[in-house]
Amino acid sequence: MPFDISLARFVEDLAKINARQAVSAVADILIVAYVIYKILVIIRGTRAVSLLKGIAILFVATMVSNLLGLRTVYWLLQKTITMLFVALPIVFMPEMRRALEQIGRGGLFAGPLGFLGKEDAAKLISDVARAAAMMAREKVGALIVIERETGVAELMETGTKIDAVVSAELLVNIFTPNTPLHDGAAIIKGNRIVAAGCYLPLTENPAVSKRLGTRHRAALGLTEQSDAAVVVVSEETGVISLAFNGKLTRYLDEGALRDKLGELLEPGRTRQGIPGWLRGHAT
């Protein structure tokens, strides 16, 4: 077929596509690409990555066995993949819950911090940062949870109710060694410490460094399941860390902790997405 005839047919077919259809097709592709990107962001650094690699290997093995005529192997792999589709919702339940929570937090619902004014939020941040610095100097271990939009009421039930206004002195007193509440986590909602001595879920991420202790693993575990910000003070080293979105930032001083908490908690800055300093993997 001559080139000019092929080109004419291509131009004719292109003319049949109206602008509305073209815009719809482009929008459709962009939406799907964005959804896939967000799914990859959500599961990055979790056990879901390893599971997806295993599934990909199974699909490749299925195609290769079919091409090589290995009927029995092909039949077994097909049945395995069928069972996987049934089991996937159960296996990926934590990641699915996390994704749905992020959708729900997309500006449609107001969270606890929305009730704090700028001055109250600044005072909360200052008190938490000052308390962390005081405990770091004395190497007093601490685990401070600051609830954002995803409620953690079920974790409050595991501790002792306090319901007191946040202050640096009260936080230091809670975590003083050999006191009844110093081993658990203190949970802050709004500008009040609602409970202390609470138990948090530990991370299941195999990539987390084995050098991290129980407090750091608990902080990561909670932030993998909610949007809470968790401040950790190491009892062994006095190092201050901040966990958020399943990531851990370590070796913070009082000023750095105050700045990073400000990005997460101050009104007007909580809708800007995940800060760049927390997009890396936990260390």
Image (cartoon, helix red, strand yellow):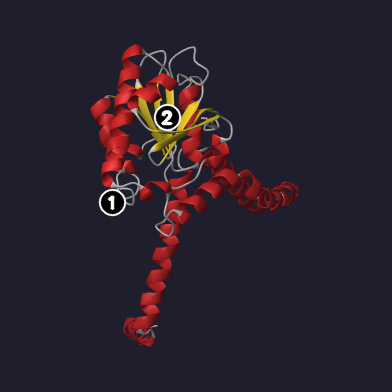
Disc 2 target residue: 144
Observer-nearest residue: 123 or 98? Answer: 123
Name the residue: 58% across, 48% down. 60
Q: Horizontal placement of 173 versus 54: left or right? A: left
Task: Please tell me whether residue 9 is drawn above or below residue 205 in the rendered image.
Answer: below
Name the residue: 63% across, 53% down. 67
Q: Horizontal placement of 158 versus 235: left or right? A: right
Residue 240: x and y in percent read 34, 23
- Checking the image for residue 16, the label placed there is none
Which numbered disc, 2 or 1, marks the residue that appears first in the sequence?
2
Q: Quadrant of residue 3?
A: bottom left
Label 2 SS: strand
Q: Quadrant of the C terminus?
A: top left
Q: Horizontal placement of 144 versus 57: left or right? A: left
Task: Please tell me whether residue 281 is drawn above or below residue 136 in the rendered image.
Answer: below
Q: Residue furthest right?
A: 72
Task: Mark yes or no: residue 2 visible.
Answer: no
Amino acid, disc 1: Gly
Amino acid, disc 2: Ile
Disc 1 target residue: 268
Alpha carbon separation for disc pair 2 and 1: 23 Å
